[in-house]
Amino acid sequence: MILQPPRTIEAQQFDVRLTPVRNGENIEIVYRAYTPISQMKLPFPAEQFTHLSVSEKDDGIAIGRSGEGVALIGAEPFGLVSLLLAPTVETPAKDYPVAQFGNQALALNLKYFQPIEVNNQPVSTLNSEGAQFQWLGGSASFESPQVAIYTDAGLPTPVVSLLAPTAEALSAHFQQGFGTALPVRPSLMFLYQAGNDGQLSVEGDVVPGQAVIKYVGGAFQEATPEMQQLVLRNLAHEMVHLWQLQHPKNATAPDWLHEGIADALASEALYISGVWDDAQYLQALTDARSNCAQVLATGTVRGAASRGHHEASYACGHMAMAALATRHEEGTSMAMWRAFLDYAARQDQPLSEDTFFAFAEEWAGDRGFALSFRSFVTSNYRSADGESIVDQLFAGTL
């Protein structure tokens, strides 16, 4: 069953048009070369699929491995061919999977299907206007000048009801807070899998102009405070990333800083925009403090990402941002982040750990606190009480 008429993506340099479609439980990628070609290489991780075959519209086309990708080679030049992909498991969200599957929709990562070589000549992949994620699951369920929302038909109503009003409020807040609108209206894509009863799990991917968020678990069927808190916090977090990705040096920020400020800005935005009340905002801070205290025992905050403990980057990064923000009269995470971006620009420095440590001393106006802040990020507290360490971070006594 095809869930949505295909949207074509042009590769103008080689006059090759690719069209992704949902073909039953499979994904089919159709390539039409208007000038026949003899070879095409794709950066596709074939090991993620149990079945990878060519639907031959021209005779004599072979498929093979080429480095980490896939090559299509014709005994004679060919003009029309399709790949049929039967997926097994999805790669972790942090690795930007080939496809994220929901109940009745999927989000396809087009970067793996753009030709990187044609007739043994290297080519570029997505152009600057190209959208990386292709939604196969129906038209937008909500559109406004601020945002377009795509929802899996199986997404529980209690989740759907939260999305559009929150996204609208957050878009206005972030546009004002960051001092700029996004260059294109963002597309937010939401998938759902039933998972287990009582389960609440969420993951997200963000690329310029697009976010894909997937909910897994039966507990999303009920509008509990816990479910609502998770949905709203995650939505706000991923939307922060849309603005972060606009900064030309965003990739130079370490994980604890990138994710920590996103978490801090997300909670702050939900509160200031009126989506959360005092109790909900304080609950988010309490949750971050508790989670950070627990993961401090796994090693340093700066090394959390390399250990696979991303919760430390989120929760402890959030605590670090909250502790530092209040050390200045402006007192908000947004004001602090804007000041840091201005500081890095004046110094012509990357958004690195060292740049942020130098900024922290200027922002706080207190070298002792800045040294304590650095210690929180870089020291190993495996033998210490995590709750006490977080308290000392805020007190500036580490």
Image: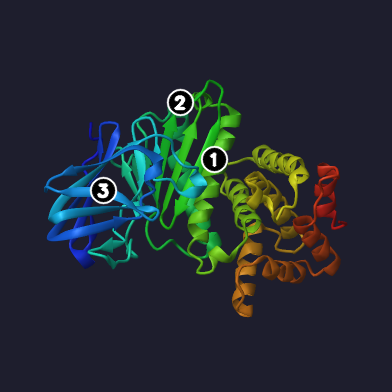
- Answer whether labels 2 and 1 touch (C-beta < 8 Å): no
Q: Which residue is painted at 81% across and 43% down in the image? A: 386
What residue did someone put label 3 on? Answer: 63
| Number of the label disc, if any, that sits on residue 89 | none
What residue did someone put label 2 on? Answer: 194
Question: Which residue is most to the top?
Answer: 197
Q: Which residue is painted at 32% across and 64% down in the image? A: 127
Crowdedness of circle 3 by 10 Å Cα count: few (<14), some, many (20+)? Answer: some
Name the secondary structure under disc 1.
helix
Name the secondary structure under disc 3.
strand
Where does residue 32 sit, x and y in percent of width and height? 16, 53
Visible residue check, residue 8: no
Crowdedness of circle 2 by 10 Å Cα count: few (<14), some, many (20+)? Answer: some
Q: Which of marks 3 and 1 is in front?
A: 3
Name the secondary structure under disc 2.
loop
Where does residue 164 sit, x and y in percent of width and height? 43, 41
